[in-house]
Each structure stands twice: as C-alpha cells, then as structure tokens.
Image: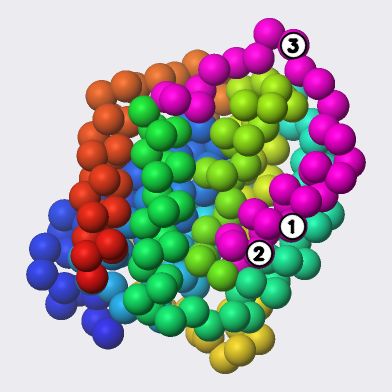
Amino acid sequence: MNIWEIEGIQYFLALLPIVAFLYAAVGHGGASGYLALMALWSFPVSMMKPTALVLNLFVAAISFIAYARKGHFNKKLFLAFALTSIPLAFLGGMIEVNAAIYKKVLAVLLVFAILRMLGLFGKDADKTVDVPVWQGLATGAVIGFFSGMIGIGGGIILSPVILLMKWGTMKETAAVSAAFIWVNSAAGLMGHFSRGVSIDPQAIWLVAIALVGGFLGGYLGSIRFDNLLLKRILAFVLVIACFKLFLT
C-alpha cells in the first residue's frame, strides 16, 4: 500500500505531529493516537500495528529522556511493572488477531486515551505508596500482553492505574510510563517480527514527522505545560476513531 495515494493523507500528516506532541507531553509514545489516525484514514491493520510501535520507540524515548533529565524517573516503580510486561508484550506480539476483533479491542483501549486527554486521570497524589509486588507484576503482565497484541506501549493504561492507586506522582508516572512504553514496544515489535511481520519502508517518513511534535512535547511536558484546547481536539478525534472502529 502506498500511503501517499491515500485520500486526504495531507491532513493525516498534519495531525501526526500534534498527536506526538500531546502524548509526549504526558510521557506517552502515542501509539493509541497513531492507531486512531490510521484507522480513520483506513490503513490496513497489518501496517498499523508495527508502524505504531516504531513511532512509539522514537517518541517515548524522547519523552523519557526529557523527564529523566529532570530527575522524575523512579526505577523501582518502573521495575514493578516491567519485569512481567516485557515477556508478555513479546508473547502478545506473536499473536495474530482477527481484523474485526482487533478494531473492537482498539476502540475500547482508546477510551483510556480519551479520558486521559480530558484530564480525568490527571490528579497528582498528595502522598504516594509503594506498589505491592503481586499487584505490580500482575498489572504489568496484563498490560504487556495486550500492548504487544494490539500494537501499543501500554502507557495509556498504566498511567491512570498508577495515579488512581497513588503509586507515583504525575511526573514520576510520566517518566515511568515513557520507559514502560519503550520496552513494551520493543518487545511487542520483536514478537511481530518473529511471525514474519515487517516494517513498511514508508514508515520512516511518519517517524520523521512525528519526531517534530515529540521533541517539543517531551521538553515542555517535563517542565510545565497543559494545553487544554489541543487535548480536547485530540479527544474529539479519538472519539470519532472509536465510532469508526466499532462500526467497521
């Protein structure tokens, strides 16, 4: 499939760096947003998952570096989830999902992204508590498996869990989520490669465009940034994508 022949591709390319910007600002790679855009522009499912994971690797890395340099990375909190998420993300990536089922599952996961962009999971904890070992391992395993299978990094699910359970501050959550997304995206991608899936060469252009927004979002988000209007616009786009995925 030649993406340059897709009708309205210029609008997709215009929205891509904005999605990367907003996700990177809160410590995410943006896979759920990229997948939503690709669904709206009718990209084939076989191209969607590996492309989103590749984009995740670059944007999440930028976001992580920006937050880590400010001293927000909590290694213990990260390991609580990553120890089980990495092997399960690889296993999830090895599973080929029926296109119709895939779209429905993706639509459900996009709800988390919508709620995050609307600020419903953005409350900072006054006091944090340690993650119980079994809860961290179980949470990491479940999120990791679905991340690899659907083609996301899992940060959009992990972030609200950390904040709701008061396991970390907002900045810690952003830093840990970015690292979590990176390792899961890499593991999930390896799982896809193991069953013969390849990266479309055209994805390099999408990476270059997404990096523009990712750099700026990661930098501003690690300091202090909250553009409510842009987040509401993105939430609206994700809602449209949800409806399309449920109806196709």
**Residue 141 - label:** 1
Q: Amino acid at mark 3?
A: Lys
**Residue 241 - label:** none
Query: x and y percent of residue 96 in the render?
Result: 53, 83
Q: Nearer the viewer, residue 241 or 34?
A: 241
Could you tell me if residue 72 is visible in this image? no
Q: Is residue 189 left or right of residue 224?
A: right
Instruction: Tell me the residue at 28%/73% (across/down).
Output: 43
Q: Is residue 88 magenta?
A: no
Query: Can you identify the residue that label 3 sits on?
Result: 127
**Within 10 Å of the Cα at label 2, are there few (<14), some (14-19), or many (20+) other Cα atoms?**
many
**Within 10 Å of the Cα at label 1, are there few (<14), some (14-19), or many (20+) other Cα atoms?**
many
Q: Is residue 173 left or right of residue 106?
A: right
Q: Which residues are magenta?
A: 119-148
Q: Amino acid at mark 1?
A: Ala
Mark 2 touching mark 3, by CB under 8 A? no
Query: x and y percent of residue 61 in the render?
Result: 61, 48
Q: CA distance from mark 2 to mark 3?
A: 30 Å
Query: x and y percent of residue 79 in the render?
Result: 83, 45
Query: Can you identify the residue that label 2 sits on?
Result: 145
